[in-house]
Image (cartoon, rainbow, N blue to C red):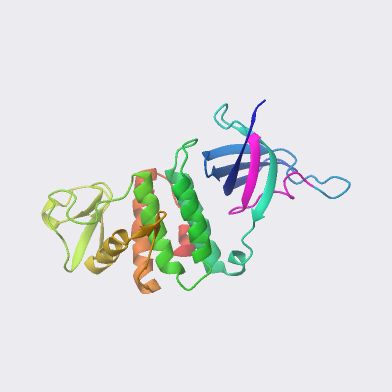
Amino acid sequence: MALRSDRCICLRKFQYSETSQILTLLGRSTGMFRVIAKGAHRRTKAGASRFDGGVDLLDLGEAVMTDPTAKELATLTEWKLLDGHLELRRDLRSLNLALYSIEQTGLLLHENEPQPAIFDLILWLIREATTDRREEAFVAFQLELLRISGFLPDLSSCASCGRPLWNGRVIFSPQAGGIICESCKPPAGPRFTTDARLVRILQTILKLPRAQGIPQRLPRLTRLQTDPVNSLLADYLRHITGHDLRVAQYVI
């Protein structure tokens, strides 16, 4: 059986047995796919393992596997750990932001669709999460993930009538796909009121120049600004995916 190799990030993991794992990996050229790592925790007499003792969330590695497009669950035959992001794991806030990023990614992507820009975006966020720029970097990550995956809401004007909305409080409607004015407010469905100044921050980030898909010169933001934005985007993600976000409670 033909094998494929790719550089991958672990998005999800489940213990299948005492020695095996089922993993969701994001390959830079392969896209998102699921594999079973048989004997991931099994050691030889010499202490070696084909999988370096198992794969953890956020691990970056070189994977060798059967063709992910051939069946629903491919087989991981080899895993070489490239980066376990130890610095990230020393700070709880940094780790939670990174874990939330891969949870969002796993919900928005389709399997076996190459997404090299999102792969690079996650690695960028993991690096930034260990710095004092982590809050604004995480907001930028979410916006870029939504943009690349085709789910970015309309934040420039009323999603229904097109009128600019820049003063006071504005209404965000997941059902309408963005911010809306009072006259266009839908009679039913979820809607959230937020400050227009926060929407302006999002627009500023969306307009920033990019280098290889990564936003440059991010504005410095505090959690007083980013927490309401993260909450708003979490509500939007719940609406468009139909799934609860388990890590959101540790981030917002």
Res 234 visible: no
Res 64 visible: yes
- Which residue extends farthest right? 45
**Is 115 rendered above or below residue 180?**
above
Q: Is residue 40 magenta?
A: no
In the rendered image, the quadrant that contains the C terminus is bottom left
In the rendered image, the quadrant that contains the N terminus is top right
Q: Is residue 99 left or right of residue 158?
A: right
**Is 90 rendered above or below residue 76?**
below
Q: Is residue 55 left or right of residue 49?
A: left
**Is 92 rendered above or below residue 3?**
below
Q: Residue 92, position in %: x, y?
A: 56, 68
Q: Residue at x 61, y 61 (%)?
A: 85
Q: Residue 147, position in %: x, y?
A: 34, 49
- Which residue extends farthest front? 211
Which of 203/184 is in front? 203
Q: Is residue 32 left or right of residue 159?
A: right
Q: Is residue 59 magenta?
A: yes
Q: Residue 225, position in %: x, y?
A: 34, 71
**Magenta region, mostly helix, strand or loop?**
loop
The tally of labels here is 0
Extent of the magenta region: 49-65
Q: Residue at x 85, y 45 (%)?
A: 44
Q: Residue 62, position in %: x, y?
A: 64, 46
**Is 110 rendered above or below residue 69?**
below
Q: Is residue 118 left or right of residue 193?
A: right
